[in-house]
Image (spheres, rainbow, N blue to C red):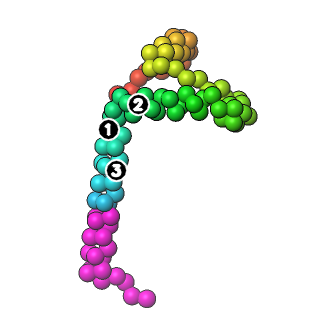
Amino acid sequence: MKGASLIELLIAVALALVISAVGVRALVEAADAFAWQPASTELSLRADAVAQLHGSPVLREKLAAISMVPWQATPQQFVAALSEERKRFDHLVKAVGYQKEDA
């Protein structure tokens, strides 16, 4: 079996660069899709769909089987709940000496 020629290596590198570029483009497009903000009517429709799911006995059974309970909240209620959790665990974080790292 012979070794790869310089041309074959250059072709392989070129293909790898093209594939990398395509991958990067796909990631950028995916990030743009997540940054897109739906219209308020669409948000309302989503909220209604989630509320309907939360009321589903089938979903409640499946979640109960894994010790979970669905909880639906407004954005303000969710922020308040996170704030309470942060207060609850703040002393533990301080006790272990965790220091926030710059990203």
Q: Nearer the viewer, residue 31 or 38?
A: 38
Q: Residue at x 32, y 73 (%)?
A: 12
* Residue 62 screen position, x and y as percent: 70, 36
Between the residue at mark 1 and the residue at mark 3, the CA separation in whole angstroms equals 14 Å
Q: Is residue 31 above or below residue 51?
A: below
The three-letter amino acid code for the residue at tag 2 is Leu
Q: Is residue 53 above or below residue 74?
A: below
Q: In terms of sequence position, does the residue under pointer 1 or pointer 2 come before the other?
A: 1
For disc 3, the marked residue is: 27
* Residue 3 screen position, x and y as percent: 37, 84
Between the residue at mark 1 and the residue at mark 2, the CA separation in whole angstroms equals 12 Å
Q: Nearer the viewer, residue 99 or 80?
A: 80
Nearer to us of marks 3 and 2 is: 2
Residue 53 position by quadrant: top right
Q: In terms of sequence position, does the residue under pointer 1 or pointer 3 come before the other?
A: 3
Nearer to us of marks 1 and 3 is: 1
Q: Is residue 96 left or right of residue 33?
A: right
**Neighbourhood count class around disc 2 (C-alpha, 10 Å): few under 14, some 14–19, many 20 upward:** few
**Neighbourhood count class around disc 1 (C-alpha, 10 Å): few under 14, some 14–19, many 20 upward:** few
The reply to whether the C-beta atoms of the residues labelled 1 and 3 are less than 8 Å apart is no
Residue 14 position by quadrant: bottom left
For disc 2, the marked residue is: 43
Label 3 residue SS: helix
* Picture quarter with the N terminus: bottom left
**Neighbourhood count class around disc 3 (C-alpha, 10 Å): few under 14, some 14–19, many 20 upward:** few
* Residue 11 screen position, x and y as percent: 28, 76
Between the residue at mark 3 and the residue at mark 2, the CA separation in whole angstroms equals 25 Å
- Residue 95 in sight here: no
For disc 1, the marked residue is: 36
The three-letter amino acid code for the residue at tag 1 is Trp
Q: Is residue 8 above or below residue 54?
A: below
